[in-house]
Amino acid sequence: MRWIRRNVVVVAGLLTLAYMILPNLVVMVFSFNKPKGRFNYSWQTFSLDAWKDPCGVADLCGSLTLSFQIAVWATIGATVLGTMIAFALVRYRFRARGAINSLIFLPMAMPEVVMAASLLTLFLNMGAELGFWTVLIAHIMFCLSFVVTAVKARVMSMDPKLEEAARDLYAGPVQTFVRVTLPIAAPGIAAGALLAFALSFDDFIITNFNAGSSVTFPMFVWGSAQRGTPVQINVIGTAMFAIAVLMVIGGQLVSDRRKRAAKP
Amino acid sequence: MTETSPTDRGGDDVRLTGISKSYGSFHAVKPLDLTVPEGSFFALLGASGCGKTTTLRMIAGLEDPTTGSVFLGEKDVTGLPPHKRPVNTVFQSYALFPHLDIYENVAFGLRRRGIKSVKKQVGDMLDLVQLGDFAKRKPHQLSGGQQQRVAVARALINHPKVLLLDEPLGALDLKLRRQMQLELKRIQTEVGITFVHVTHDQEEAMTMADTVAVMNAGRVEQLGAPAELYENPQTTFVANFLGTSNLIEADVAEKNGDEVVVTSAGVKLRLPADRCTSQVADGGRLLVGVRPEKISLAHADDAGSVPAGRNRISGRIVDSSFIGVSTQYVINSPVCGELEVYAQNIERDGRLVPGAEVVLHWNPAHTFGLDAAQDIDAGVKTVDEEGA
């Protein structure tokens, strides 16, 4: 009894973790599978075939590259615009500020299907050719609200006196922004950018409506799930998961070392 | 400490001419002229909202004056942005850059001016504020007092013509504040730079500054050395804000050369004519003031022993509080409801307890006279609020 009481938090934590990690583990394990037939749903024998030839399936790596390109540009666009919007909303008083403040949350709150359909209507009415650019515009649009929210929180907690201090210490407007404002807002901007990248990279609904004949990686996975799932999809998924985990661990190590170095 | 070259240190007074700041219809600072002599420790003293911080920010360039000009020496800097003024500020919240360590915080100003070899200067400056061992720490790892010293070092390292201090000790506890007052005074003497210090703490202003300007509602009420302000307040606001004053409304009875005789509730009081701020005319009114520590108390039974030639008022003790070095009495008398008397605890008279009949007496030379047209309680309430 005592043991349970003392460790209940740890057990609950581990169970939650297992609940979240288990699907990823399945993906990982099945990336080493050699399925019979076209569907990779039951375990057969261990094999490295898919890992040796990740682009072995037609169109897979093309869709991956497209997704990657869109995600990078959407992240850059949304982060730059979102950061500027966040600063404007926190620092300046202007007309319609309140309205913008609440409207910026709309893309987060609205069902994605609705947004996807209305975007498609808009693009068709404008006579735009569906493809890379329409998808990019749509992604920047919905990533924006996440970036704004993340950066705004950071800018709001920032003492405006810090910038005054920088100006007082011989930093011109540009220097003040580069040396003080940006570094202090950086964690918020980075968080917003990471969110934007993740959201853009795996978005399916909005992309599917507005992509025309282009095929992104999520669209490829969905399409192939109906005709048979190549093991390579698991390989790509596992690689992405591994990269993300490595990045988190790396970041943790760097900040730990910094903390230790700062201590006397 | 290396001084800036002697040539640019001549005549670096700070001069404000007709400077004012309005926000819409609210006048934060009314047109004001002020000269801060080079090398002095100058305090702007006033309650919150009196315009002292706005005045400071106009000197720094962080606020544009509505009218008037700011001069540093002979140079008009009114139109210069803050980063082009040879002026540095210590902010109330310190405003240390959280992402930089102490070393880089202190080096910030030097680096922005393109100075490459900052190591020696930063080291010297950290030693001056006794933080040499803390160079690699981040601001949040330091105590309030240490952060405060970093803020001072970060400003001083640039050898500004003027160092502006905006309530720099406001966030510190009382004991540390007293310590830092002496510390700042020491640093100012050591570096010889003009300090303009904004504070609402009258004791702090008097302890540290050579010259104090008392501000009220966007105007400078009075300017002078601390002792001068304390002994010869020109307005009721200064009399009440700077320490405590007993102010008695009185009618002018006669004027004999250097001496003015007034009466209040039948009591005759005398004061020197040159200590009256307003024109004294027979039949006019005056506010007669005397500081609580100037008054002596005698029990009514000993009234005969009070020397002749002193102002005397009889009354009854309504309250007394013992505060260590002195005892503070509140005395009810016909001339004034509440007279305050501070008596040093040298030889305490056991009969001086609430309810006792007493005679208050003081040297007429310690009496000052103010224009009776003013609000007798100006500046009183503010002190209570700030003390809370």
Image (cartoon, rainbow, N blue to C red):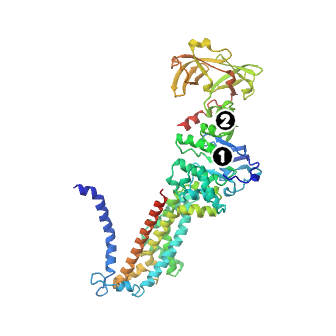
Mark 2: few, some, or many residues within 10 Å (few <14, many ≥20)?
many
**Which residue does the numbered mark 1 point to in the structure image?**
B190
Percent from the top left, x then y, of residue A120?
A: 47, 76
Which residue type carries mark 2? Pro
Percent from the top left, x then y, of residue B381?
A: 58, 34
Q: Earlier in the sequence, mark 2 or mark 1?
A: 1
Q: Name the chain under label 1.
A: B
Above or below residue B258? Residue A13 is: below
At x 66%, y 35%, the residue is B226
Q: CB atoms at circles 2 and 1 under 8 Å apart?
A: no
**Which residue does the numbered mark 2 point to in the structure image?**
B226
| Residue nearer the viewer, A158 or A81 | A158
Q: Is A221 placed left or right of B340 in the picture?
A: left
Above or below residue A23? Residue B304 is: above
For the residues marked 2 and 1, what is the alpha-carbon distance in whole angstroms? 21 Å
Percent from the top left, x then y, of residue A233?
A: 37, 81
Which residue type carries mark 1? Glu
